[in-house]
Amino acid sequence: MDFHVMLDTYEEERLADRKFGSTKSGIAPFYSDKFAKVGIQVCQLFDKDLLHARLVNSLTKKNILLKHLYNKPELDADELTEKYYALGQQIKPLACNTTNLLHDALKADKSILLEGQLGALRDPDHGIYPYTTSSSPLAGGATIGAGVPAVAIKEIIAVTKAYSSSVGTGFFVSKLEGEAGEELRRRGGDAGEYGAKTGRPRDVGWFDAVATRYGCMVQGATQCAMTNLDVLSYLDEIPVCIAYNINGREVTDFPVTPELAHATPVYTVLKGWKTDIRGITKYEDLPENCRAYVKFAEQQINVPITILSNGPRREEVIYRIPGVQHAT
């Protein structure tokens, strides 16, 4: 609802330098409503009386916050009922029981692709809480959201960049600062590393094998896709973070959030390949040092890297099939 976006924005403004780096999309207020059982489901938009009753209940606390915490105008349940009921009528022909739809597809032995957004470290249970999102971006969370059983999932493909990036607040152990970070940010992504929703510059850094290995583990990844491999083609040497130093201890297991404040990266430096790899379609045609980088990352994360992207276009993908012998 638009009031979720409004509340998200007001709260970030109130927190000021203590903010969590919200995209101000209303996600946290929405999930607050969901778990407080005052949220509004799509099916409730179609019953005007029920919708009004739900809004009256939901706005009771919100108006207290708006008036006394944020010093903003209160919301009117009657006005919002008319607005949301009209919107509900527009989407009603498109609404269906998606759980039945997916289970019918399973019975018909059809393929279903569930795609999550954000990385494992933004999970509110297993990530760098409180610098997380409000729902689970893990593969297990996808089964709950879609209403399909966990046993129906046959493959889990983790997606990682050939380097690290992050938007929003939170700890980032392998973060690159200064001119080196700016160059990687400028070269990265489809058109530079900037937030898809906010346009904010992303923090960038070297590939973090500690965080990626942990992410693949909690995802239950059966294979991994490594994107943006071509971005690193300008480098003579490429550091890879293989461990953290925390108060003099070298650790390879991802630590609890408070310890990240004291973590510094431990790097292994690999040779770069210093040549443009865009247009290459076969793994064995990649430069030797490029293949060595992929194999080293694969060994570090303990998951086979089966897909590589070497450009932003859809066709710029290299399939690296496990078990197939490639040139070394």
Image (cartoon, rainbow, N blue to C red):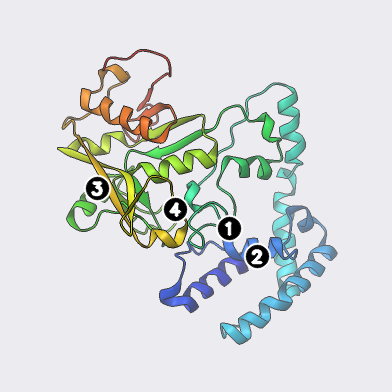
Q: Residues within 10 Å of mark 3 (few under 14, many from 20)?
A: many
Dot 3 corresponds to which residue? 184
Numbered circle sitting on residue 32: 2
Counting residues from the start of the chain, the first of labels 3 and 4 encountered is 3
Residue type at mark 4 is Pro
SS state under label 4: loop
User: Which amino acid type corresponds to the residue marked 2 in the rendered image?
Assistant: Ser
Disc 1 + disc 2, Cβ < 8 Å: yes
Left or right, 324 with respect to 11, comes to left
Q: Give the numbered dot on residue 45.
A: none
Packing grade of label 2 (10 A; few <14, some 14-19, many >=20) is: some
The circle drawn on residue 134 is 1
At x 35%, y 12%, the residue is 325
Q: Residue at the spot x=50%, y=64% of the render? A: 24
- Name the front one of labels 3 and 4: 4
**Foreground tag (4 vs 2):** 4
